[in-house]
Amino acid sequence: MTSQKQFLDTIRSKLEGGTRTPVSIPPDWAPVIEDPLERFATELEAVHGHAHRCLRARLSSTVAEIVASYGASRVLLTREEPLPPDLDQVIEGVGATVSWWPEGGRDPAEAADVGVTGALWAVAETGTVVVTSAAPGGRAPSLLPTVHVAVVAASRMVDTVAALFKEIAALPKRPSNLVLVTGPSKTGDIENILVQGVHGPKEQHTIAVEDL
Amino acid sequence: MTLFPTCLGTLLFPGASAAAERVLEAGGATVTSVVEDLCCGQPAWNSGHVKDARRVAERALDALADADEIVACSGSCTSMVSHYWVELFEGTPRAAEAERVAQRTHEFSSYVAGELGVDGLGPLKTARPRRVAYHDSCHMLRGLGISDEPRQLLAAVEGLELKDLAAQDRCCGFGGTFSIRFPELSAAMADEKVDDVSEHEAEELVASDLGCLMQICGRARARSVDFSCRYIAEVLDEAMPQTIS
Amino acid sequence: MTEAYDYTKPFEERARVSLEDSEMRAIVGLAVDRNASGRTRSMTSLRDPEAVRELGAQVRDFNISHLDQHLERLAETWTEAGGKIFFAQTAEEAASYVVSVAKKSGATEAVKSKSMVTEEIGLNEALTEAGIEPIETDLGQYIVQLAGEPPSHIVAPSVHKSKEQVTDLFSLTGGERLENDADVLTEFARKRQRPSFLSAGVGISGVNMAVADEGTLCLVTNEGNGRLCTSMPPVHVAVMGMERVVWDFDQLAVILSLLGRGNTGQKLSQYTSLLHGPKRSAEVDGPTESHLVIIDNNRSNLLGTRYQSALRCIRCGACLNICPVFRQVSGYAYDPVYSGPIGAVITPLLKGVENAGELAHASTLCGACTSVCPVKIPLHDLLLYIRQDFAPHASATERAAYKAWSLAWSKQWGFALTKRAGRVLGRVTGGRPLRRLYLPLMSRWTKGRHFPGFPGGRRRPRP
């Protein structure tokens, strides 16, 4: 069995005599984004996701409308920001039953037609939302349900992927899993025919919530 | 200047280099010498046989070493001399000479359009109006970065309608000895080119590389697909005002 | 279908198998064209695409030229995050380790997110031998697994398969006739594989890029199977080629911007997952054990050589999608693991030039690969260098032929003799184009092409 030391020594000795080359990433290499909220919606729609915008007061009803549009009967919610604590009541009002993550463990997530989670950031350049495994969130809520609805504060919209990673790098506590979600799951593996909905959620909605 | 017909030009297509010479002279250049019977060494170089390539290229280097300006009738040979000769002769006593020759070697169409200027050729009008397509050979396009100049030259010929191909920058499958190593694969690659030309109803294919023309037209003939192939100098030569001597 | 591809025979024979399959060629051609034009289009959404490619090359050269330092730091930070690390010099060591982790977990099933390096080390065979069933979950990889075939493209493993073939395969697997429709077939895979995701004892993934200073593994997928494999089973094993590492998140952002675009023309793929060790104690779900296996398997052969730049590769597949040879013969003609231009470069370097150097000749050196590589690997130049290293191992006939040719043409009289012979043949044949050339080696020209004719006859040859 090779040890770490032997492994790295092999590399070191082969690199000897060569140059350790430098790198310098200019601060402005990424695209310039006009009107981030607009751009975000365009990008998300282009990858067959659905972009919504609403004021905080209308958040619960916006979620409920999405749930109702699928005729959904089972919904999983997390207690993440910026989801309001009375969201379950509004959703029950359109006829769905609600589970709260993590009560019941993984099963309610797998059974859920719609999973509603928070998100840490959104990225205008690509129509991406970033979900976290950190409590009160988890991995299953954005992954197992058939439809994923991500709610993100509009103030947490960043322009570019490059800008996003600066934010991630600055996180004081790193969760075990951050996922950059860009639209619903897809494949082109059968004759390059685009199919939406593979192993991950079949539909993806993002609601950008604005304060007055 | 010195005209380098290349081995294909010398052995199989003397008409191509003769046309090139006439066009260069009409454009105001003085062709002081035509160095036939030379090979840049590319066939062996591309197959990884470096010593063999150098042996052959050295005789070309001997002939070209004192030339002020060299124009070659081929994108691939130009690329070999101007890009790869430095590597080929690296570490040998001929390295500096090779470097000098490399810097002074130009491809025909880029020289005519760039250095001489297409207007210098006089009014260009063809006696056979036709639809032509231009094939970007790999060495021209990606090796030398030349794609505008040949098109400028063709655009200047009255009576030629220049058609774009769907995949004009895709390799034709010649690849020098590749065409001999893998003839079926090479022919399959040529098929796409042949189909592209005939689908766009071009009556003639023009290129700056004789190898590519041989490959594409050779395949077209085998399939009885009817279009002609011309080296770019021949197109210009035919369209130039003919002086009666 | 892959029994037809014999890797003990020369490339030409495998190419012929592919060339005779016109349906496959059409399917592959369409698929790679779509991806290639997607790439061109999406690159324009970068402010200065060439500058970003240059940046990508710079980042990767920085990583490779500091590889020992990057990997040392990665081991530190991954361990700090609670992960386990294993350095595997050889394919055997790597496969062995993964199998032992899987056995210890008590798993009978291992769900896998596609990983080319696991193909390279023969992991599926090793798991099966140990009584653990590997279940490929990337749709394309699942298709070839059911077909008993290796992947035919480093990014799109089933690019050579028609929809009808997949329908037949899935119908056979499911025991009932499925509709010949891509949506139906995909739904079949989703339903069939779901239980495995939720019950498998171990999940195995590759790593698109490790971030050394952050102890983070970045895994990029479109289907969600990568997330499921790394989140649902209690044990996760990530396997990576040692060169797949960047230093920090700024560098990762550059690479991700190039990867999706080079791949299929997306700015980002659907899921970019950042894994930072096993689940935290305060977290509800995620693996309790997370292993990282770092593999050399002869990659260090490239370090300090003129081939070092090949290690920049981020496995985007852009070179496969643009290659005029790949579109004709597709992956199996090259090698069961890595194909296309990058495959033709690294396979000889990993397996030994004398063993696989012939692959470097499966190219016209057209340079299209170099022109699209997001990290500017000079692929066509590297192919040429491999040909140089392979030349002493070429057939005796080839070496003798080039020697004779060079000795003749290094002399004025030698070339003149060739010219003379051409003129004589021209007079004899009247300068006509020829359907057959009865000359050594040159006779291969007329397999499918006419020869333009020799000068010296009444007609002047035209190409």
Image: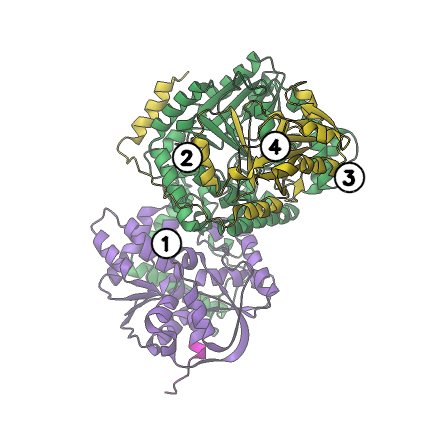
Chain colours: A yellow, B purple, C green
Disc 2 from disc 1: Cα separation: 24 Å
Q: Which mark is residue C224?
A: 4
Q: Name the residue nearer the viewer: B57 or C258.
A: C258
- Amino acid at dot 4: Gly
For this orientation, the residue located farthest to the bottom is B244
- The mark total stands at 4
Disc 2 from disc 4: Cα separation: 33 Å
- Is C243 drawn above or below residue B234 in the view shown? above
- Does the magenta segment cover residue B241? yes
- Amino acid at dot 1: Gln
Q: Label 3 belongs to which residue?
A: C179
Callout 4–callout 1 Cβ contact below 8 Å: no
Labels 4 and 1 share a subunit: no
Residue C67, quarter of picture: top left
Residue C66, quarter of picture: top left
In this orientation, does residue B72 appear?
Answer: yes
Helix, strand or loop status at disc 4: loop
- From the image, which quarter does the C terminus of chain A lie in? top right
Callout 4–callout 3 Cβ contact below 8 Å: no
- Is A2 drawn above or below residue B3 in the view shown? above
Q: Label 1 belongs to which residue?
A: B42
Q: Nearer the viewer, mark 2 or mark 4?
A: 4
- Amino acid at dot 2: Leu
Q: Residue, x 71% and y 31% (percent of image)? A: A90
Callout 3–callout 1 Cβ contact below 8 Å: no
Whole-percent x, y for residue C276 in the image = 48, 24
Helix, strand or loop status at disc 2: helix
Q: Label 2 belongs to which residue?
A: C349
Q: Nearer the viewer, mark 4 or mark 3?
A: 4
Few, some or many C-alpha atoms within 10 Å of disc 4 (few <14, some 14-19, many ≥20)?
many
